[in-house]
Image (cartoon, helix red, strand yellow):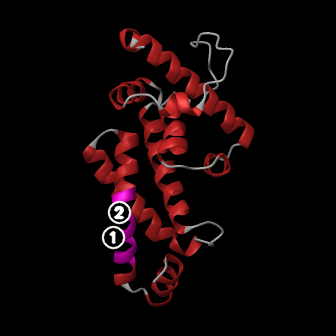
């Protein structure tokens, strides 16, 4: 059965096996997203359970305007971001602060970002702030379009493009700074 069918059967008959099926389909993906954002296995496990509780409580609100997987991703992402924001009470994760960046006149190409070695990429991602890391992972790891990211973050497409541009510039700057001898 496709996701919409599973949801309709679950809502009509409260069939636990239908919700179990959704858990089997999405549990690993939710956990992976949580671990990539929260950087802690125990937190990611707890977050996965919390996300599924939210899905369970709000399943009747799923309106099929998007794919179920997109809806699940949105709940997962928002839960993790809310957790991070609570943890860093005064941090504004998506603040447009580029004062710490050097002046970069040329735009950083996608190829330049995608060509960063895996060992370098891990270090660079750790150095980025949570908002920069999240937006780059959405675009390059999760393959989300600008439109999908804008919808998820409730931002305009131009604002998302600017944030991606700035995050790419910061990643390039960090690569140059941290890996001078390899550059």
- Mark 2 lies on residue: 27
**Front residue of this view, candidates 124 and 110:** 110
Q: Position of residue 85 (x, y in %)?
A: 48, 36
Instruction: Tell me the element at label 2.
Output: helix
Q: CA distance from mark 1 to mark 2?
A: 6 Å
Instruction: Tell me the element at label 1.
Output: helix
Image height of 39 relative to 179, above or below = below
Query: Residue 17 in magenta?
Result: no
Q: Position of residue 87 (x, y in %)?
A: 41, 35
- Residue 156: in sight, yes or no? no
Query: Residue 23 in magenta?
Result: yes
- Mark 1 lies on residue: 24
In the image, taking residue 127 as reference, residue 65 lies left or right, namely right
Q: Position of residue 129 (x, y in %)?
A: 47, 27
Prevailing secondary structure of the magenta residues = helix
**Front residue of this view, candidates 145 and 64:** 145
Q: In the picture, residue 37 is in which quadrant?
A: top left
Name the residue: 63% across, 32% down. Answer: 163
- Kindly check if marks 1 and 2 are in contact, taking CB atoms under 8 A apart as contact: yes
In the image, taking residue 114 as reference, residue 149 lies left or right, namely right
Q: In the picture, residue 70 is in which quadrant?
A: bottom right
- Residue 167: in sight, yes or no? yes
Identify the image quadrant of the N terminus: bottom left
Q: Residues within 10 Å of mark 2 (few under 14, many from 20)?
A: some
Name the residue: 42% across, 13% down. Answer: 183
Magenta residues (range): 19-29
Residue most extreme to the left:
42
């Amino acid at each position: 059965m496709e996701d919409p069918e599973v949801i309709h059967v679950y809502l009509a008959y409260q069939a636990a096996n239908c919700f179990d099926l959704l858990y089997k389909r999405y549990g690993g993906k939710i956990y992976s997203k949580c671990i990539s954002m929260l950087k802690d296995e125990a937190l990611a496990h707890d977050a996965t359970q919390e996300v599924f509780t939210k899905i369970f409580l709000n399943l009747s609100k799923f309106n099929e305007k998007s794919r179920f997987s997109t809806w699940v991703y949105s709940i997962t992402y928002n839960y993790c971001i809310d957790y991070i924001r609570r943890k860093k009470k005064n941090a504004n994760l998506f603040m447009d602060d580029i004062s710490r960046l050097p002046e970069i006149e040329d735009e950083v190409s996608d190829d330049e970002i995608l060509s960063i070695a895996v060992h370098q990429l891990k270090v660079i991602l750790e150095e980025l702030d949570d908002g920069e890391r999240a937006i780059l992972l959405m675009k390059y790891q999760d393959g989300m379009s600008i439109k999908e990211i804008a919808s998820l973050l409730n931002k305009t497409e131009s604002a998302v493009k600017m944030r991606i541009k700035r995050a790419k510039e910061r990643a390039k700057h960090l690569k140059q700074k941290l890996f001078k001898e390899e550059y």
